[in-house]
Amino acid sequence: MSEASNPSRTAPTPASSGAPAVSVPRTLAGQKALVTGANSGIGRAVAIALGQAGADVVVNYVVGDDAAQSVVEEVRRGGVRAFAHQADVSSEEQVEAMFARACTELGTLDILVNNAGLQRDAPFATMTLAQWNTVIGINLTGQFLCARAAIREFLRRGVVPSVSCAAGKIICMSSVHQEIPWAGHPNYASSKGGIKMMMESLAQEVAPHHIRVNSIAPGAIRTPINTAAWNTPQAYTRLMTLVPYGRIGEPEDIARAAVWLASDQSDYVVGTTLFVDGGMTLYPGFATGG
Ligand code: NAD
């Protein structure tokens, strides 16, 4: 019987507002993970799911000590180690210090989930350089800095067959906007388009070392980053014209994909973007003939 089909080796997923409740198999037992932007939304759900799957987890955050601590406590319910670490992912110095602490306290690192991100929206003509630089600095440069630190540790340690087939796994949180242009959000869409090419170039470079780098491209997920898109009936109805599957995504929908991409279940998946978007990238405007 495989681990996935053995109910005695599963942990319950906390109920959420919409995503189906399922059990998480302990496919990451003994692995060490770091999740950026893990005290809110998608990062929070990913950190908790990694813990349920058996990984020790570093919960990165930049502001919000209490929220970070509550995620740490939820992760520990999976019977694993977890701690919060405050760092701005756009700061080279802070990122280096965070990875040094992670490797010291946990021994090494097997999984990075490059999740931290934000929006600073404005029409192109009035967008300030500060709005542009903030989004590129956190969403794209932040992923570069964290991925570089993780790669150095993966290369140093190599494959440990008793832990995983791979020498390390990186999951970049991209967006459907790595494909779909987004008027009024050129900085955000550019950052996600940049993540696509950074991820694929890195995946190509490090695959020979048995390091797997992939992305998840979420569609519309119910988190604080996009509250205005779902928090009134009118907004929700309008959003559903873009989602063939007919419901908003929940953070747990992304968390399950992240656990799979981090596990040996996806061992031959390299340099791919997994769209978890309820069909948003299927050009729903053409569903009735265009
Ligand atoms: P969120 O606002 O709930 O979470 C974002 C997290 O990033 C927060 O914890 C925030 O504190 C953290 N963060 C911001 N700046 C940081 C910095 N400088 N250093 C460290 N952490 C920082 O939003 P979310 O929806 O959970 O977003 C998570 C990721 O998912 C982002 O990369 C976002 O672009 C992506 N995404 C979200 C959606 C969606 O619909 N919610 C869709 C596509 C992609």
Image (spheres, rainbow, N blue to C red):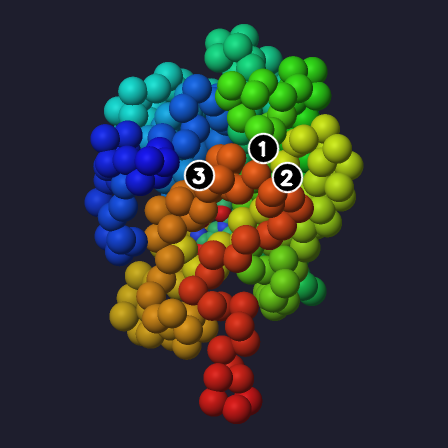
Given the current orientation, which residue lies at the most extreme front position?
1
Q: Along the line of sight, which residue is nearer the eye, 289 or 95?
A: 289
- Residue at 75%, 41% in the rendered image: 204
Residue 180, percent across and down?
61, 66
The residue carrying mark 2 is 213
SS for tag 3? helix
CB-based contact (under 8 Å), mark 1 and mark 3: no
Q: CA distance from mark 1 to mark 3?
A: 11 Å
Say left or right for 90 vs 119.
Answer: right
Q: Amino acid at mark 2?
A: Val
Residue 128 at least partly seen: no
The residue carrying mark 1 is 169
Residue 136, percent across and down?
66, 45
Q: Earlier in the sequence, mark 2 or mark 3?
A: 2
- Residue at 35%, 46% in the rendered image: 252
Q: Mark 2, residues whose alpha carbon is within 10 Å: few (<14), some, or many (≥20)?
A: many
- Residue at 72%, 28% in the rendered image: 209
Q: Amino acid at mark 3?
A: Val
Q: CA distance from mark 2 to mark 1?
A: 6 Å
Queried on whether the Cβ of the residue with tag 2 lies below 8 angstroms from ligand 1, the answer reads no
Say left or right for 253 vs 153.
Answer: left
Residue 95, percent across and down?
61, 23
Queried on whether the Cβ of the residue with tag 3 lies below 8 angstroms from ligand 1, the answer reads no
Q: Mark 1, residues whose alpha carbon is within 10 Å: few (<14), some, or many (≥20)?
A: many
Given the current orientation, which residue lies at the most extreme bottom position?
289
Q: Is residue 129 above or below residue 6?
A: below
The residue carrying mark 3 is 259
CB-based contact (under 8 Å), mark 2 and mark 1: yes
- Residue at 67%, 31% in the rendered image: 210
